[in-house]
Image (cartoon, rainbow, N blue to C red):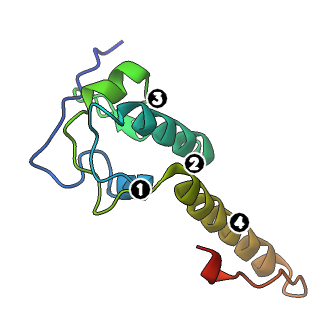
Amino acid sequence: MSTINITPKTDQRFPLQMWSMNLGLYEVTDDNWHEFFVRVRLYEEFGNAPMLKYSDTNEPVTITPEMAKQHIGCRLGDRNQERDAWWIRIMDNRAKSLEFAVEEFDADVEFPEHDESKF
C-alpha cells in the first residue's frame, strides 16, 4: 500500500477538491481540525467517495483524524459556518437533489416548497 503523503498547501485556495469549500470552513486550524475531520467524513459518507487522495498514486483514501490534523493551515473557502447551519445547508441540498430525481422519474409527484428564509 502507498504511504500517505498529504501535506497542507497553504498557498492554494482549494487544497483538496473544488467542492471542499462546501465544508463551510475558511481554513483548518489548531482549533477546528477536529471539525474539519467530522465534516469531511460526513461528506464522504453522503457522497460515498473519499475527498483525499494518495499523493503518489492519486488513489482515493478515506480521511482519518491524523490526516485531518496534517491539514492545519489549509485554506478551504471564503467563510466559516457553524455546524448546525452547515448541516441544514448540506441536508437541504441533498434533499433537493433527491426530490429532483423523483420529479424527473414521475412529474406527478409534488414536494412541499422550500422556505429559504429559514437558512
Dot 1: within a 10 Å radius of its alpha carbon, few (fewer than 14), some, or many (20 or more) residues?
Answer: many
**Marks 1 and 3, the one that precedes in the sequence:** 1
Dot 4: within a 10 Å radius of its alpha carbon, few (fewer than 14), some, or many (20 or more) residues?
Answer: few
Kindly check if marks 2 and 3 are in contact, taking CB atoms under 8 A apart as contact: no
In the picture, the quarter occupied by the C terminus is bottom right
Of helix, strand and loop, which one carries label 4?
Answer: helix
Q: Nearer the viewer, mark 1 or mark 2?
A: 1
Residue type for callout 1: Gly
Q: Nearer the viewer, mark 1 or mark 3?
A: 1
Residue name at image x 52 percent, y 50 percent: 83
Of helix, strand and loop, which one carries label 1?
Answer: loop
The answer to whether 112 appears left or right of 38 in the picture is right
The numbered dot on residue 62 is 3
Of helix, strand and loop, which one carries label 3?
Answer: loop
Residue 88 lies in quadrant: bottom right
Could you tell me how far apart the alpha carbons at marks 4 and 3 are, in whole angstroms? 24 Å
Percent coordinates x, y for residue 31 in the rendering:
32, 34
Q: Nearer the viewer, mark 4 or mark 3?
A: 4
Residue type for callout 2: Gly
Could you tell me how far apart the alpha carbons at marks 4 and 1 are, in whole angstroms? 18 Å
The answer to whether 59 appears left or right of 72 in the picture is right
Dot 3: within a 10 Å radius of its alpha carbon, few (fewer than 14), some, or many (20 or more) residues?
Answer: some
Q: Which residue is mark 1?
A: 24
Q: Which residue is mark 2?
A: 47
Q: Which residue is mark 4?
A: 95
Could you tell me how far apart the alpha carbons at marks 2 and 4 are, in whole angstroms? 13 Å
Could you tell me how far apart the alpha carbons at marks 1 and 2 are, in whole angstroms? 16 Å
Could you tell me how far apart the alpha carbons at marks 1 and 3 are, in whole angstroms? 19 Å
**Marks 2 and 4, the one that precedes in the sequence:** 2
